[in-house]
Amino acid sequence: MPEQDAESSGLDDGGALEVGSQAEGGLSNVTAFTMDTPNVVRRANLVLGKANALPQDFMALGNGALGMAVWAAGGFTAQLNRTDTFPDRKSLGQVLIPGLATLTGAADFSGHVDLYDATMTESGGGMTATIFVRADSPEVVVDVTGADPSSMQTAQVKLWSGRSPTASAANGVATLAETWKDSDMAGSDQTFGVLSALSVGGRNATASVVDPLTVQVAFQPNADGSFRVVIAAPSWSGGDAMTTGTGVLGSDATTPLAAVEQAHLAWWHAYWNNVGLVKMTSSDGSADYFESLRTIYLFLSAAESGGTYPGSQAGVADLFNYLQDSQPWFPAGYWFWNLRMQVAANMTSGAFGTNTPIFGLYQSNVANLQAWTKSKMGGKSGICTPETMRFNGNGYYNDGEGNASCDESASPSYNALTLTSGTEVALWVWRQYLMTQDRTFLSTNYPVMSQAATFLLAYAQQGPDGLLHTMANAHETQWNVQDPVTDIVAMQALFPAVVSAAGLLGTDAALVAQLQSALAKIPPLPRTDAASHSQLLTASDDSGGQDVFAISYQPNAPKHNSENLDLEAVWPYDLIGDTGPNSALAQRTYSKRMFVDSADWSFDALQAARLGLSAEVVNALTVVTQRYQSFVNGLGLLGGGSNNGSSEPYVEQLGVLTAAVNEALIQDYDGLLRIASAWPSAWDGSGSIYIQGKSKVDVEVQGGNVVLAIVEAGSTGSVNVRNPWSGQAAIVVDGSTNTTVVPTTSASTFAIPAVAGHWYEIVPASVGRALPSVEVTGAPATTAKTFGPVTLGL
């Protein structure tokens, strides 16, 4: 199997996705499992049976650093956004093309977003518009055919009150440019800005400055009724706007469309061929709907996650904002609680490159975080990574207006003493290494791991009982309490990971010795009563069956948020699964959890999958989707409910769904490959999930039964597998050599002696050597989809 490139898709300096750099997919000689990639992706296409005239019904397109929200108001409106317009994430403006009202207002209007091509197409009234954000250049393209050649048309880019751009026009090109300095008390002292350069391929094009906030190109369509609007929107921190804009635009307004879109289509097709797709069906249509949401997530993840900075800062889909400069929360800062589900979903889907901006954000700020920690956390060494970390590596919130993170003087407050955000980042670094085996990636990001562990060691104090104790936040839910469970699971999970990473890299012998000594001093997970979650209990109470995990050793302390921290040991800390001494207690904790489906970021479905609770996976995904998916493009709202067009969309719900579906189908977080361990019996599913060792698993489940599973081995070593047919016999055949490598066995677990580049088919022994094969096919969506009160498309 070709090796995966863990450094995969990113952006060049111009803000365009690097073509052909996405992680490679499976083996070319796997004959027992094939995927009709274009048509399976297109099962999730967003179909518009009517024009999406309301702003909140926008469609999202992007190339990782440049994104836009597109809707049909006034014919055509699109808001442009970039990932690098800090500290306020200001928009580049809105694009207006009034002449498309003939199209969008036509009785025969139709439209759709083709996810495989990352292209929106609209038709009506004899006109067609093809719309995309180029993957290979920081450009928006709107290509139109069927217009009245004799008509006069305009295209505008405009900003709004409160902005102070410089507008210019010359030789058929109009630009709006603005810069500002990030120079307040929390600032980076960097210059940021926006630049939009507008050009039109048509006749008699004339650029002009309409007013200080608006530029325009007026034109006639070509004699054949075609025209093309192109907007260049590169990263901008000052200079000659016209020279820069025209340099990006080149001749793209008049070059044949096939040439303009060639590299764009090539990048997206390569991306889809190299991520793990899953086709899902059920008699009630719920699985099909969840499949569409999962595919939409993979599309949006690539569309927002290819720049220097992550596209989402608090689980919000910032790159697709449609509300001018209105931003929720703290747009200069990143909330890792709201990013972690996206990191997980990207990994198990094989979209490793979409995590590059997130890891780069924290790795590049290690020195800044060390300085912040020393200044704000009592001179301690290492890094206390702020839960709301500003992009330049400090914990100021809203640039000094209270609620700072990793700041003892700000306690008690939501994140003043939240100590474990750095641990989470560090553990995801380790997991991505385990999956990609990319030693360079590990070496580059190891300081995040070692410095997070160094800080936890420095902060914890040994008590009279010989154990390490902390007074800190249980994330945002309890403030400044004794031994929050988040600190305990952080030490339990991070210390062994750093020991292993340091061993691989041959470094930090002294730190390793300290961590190994500390492992024996970590307190046990706290317990409380299941009825009121207020009494402090101990492990001796487990036998009574009335206790659950607690979120701290002060379970009765006030609650300030609705986070089920008592299940953090299950996910994301990977300490408890569906078997083992604490599994029953964890399952009881899940059933008695304090907060049920409490926000669009609810991790209930993910934690249910890890505990093997397939019915709860269905229930949680259903409730959360129907409660919080408030946009017809698949995006959600934090609090759910009806969408009145006044709130930015959130992508975090889609991240949880994708990660949960992946975990329900395939798990190997602890070195044991579980196949369909939490897959709902009413769902059929066929797809591919990525696992450790540069490998992936292809699987088909029908009628609640695993038909086959194929391990595509990216490295040589033993792959330990739980028998998918409990109590029945299984065999494993090396499909590359057509030899049996695991003879008939009814053991509950068995080991596959894998060789890199080979693929291994796991089937029931009853099939003999007549090995089954699977061809996964699909057809493009033709109508909008509904699931109870929610809809995809119009």
Image (spheres, rainbow, N blue to C red):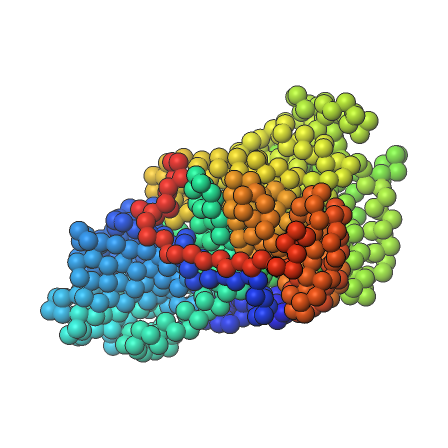
Residue at x-position 17% and y-position 73%: 224
Q: Which of 649 and 698 is in front in this view?
A: 698
**Residue 693: x and y, percent?**
69, 61
Question: Is residue 205 in sight in this rendering?
Answer: no
**Residue 412: x and y, percent?**
64, 35
**Residue 612: x and y, percent?**
64, 40
Q: Quadrant of residue 157?
A: bottom left
Q: Nearer the viewer, residue 232 or 706?
A: 706
Residue at x-position 72% and y-position 33%: 584
Residue at x-position 74% and y-position 48%: 746
Of the 4 image quadrants, the one containing the N terminus is bottom right
660 left or right, relative to 117: right
235 left or right, relative to 511: left
419 left or right, relative to 238: right
Residue at x-position 79% and y-position 25%: 543
Q: Quadrant of residue 505?
A: bottom right
Image height of 613 relative to 161, above or below: above
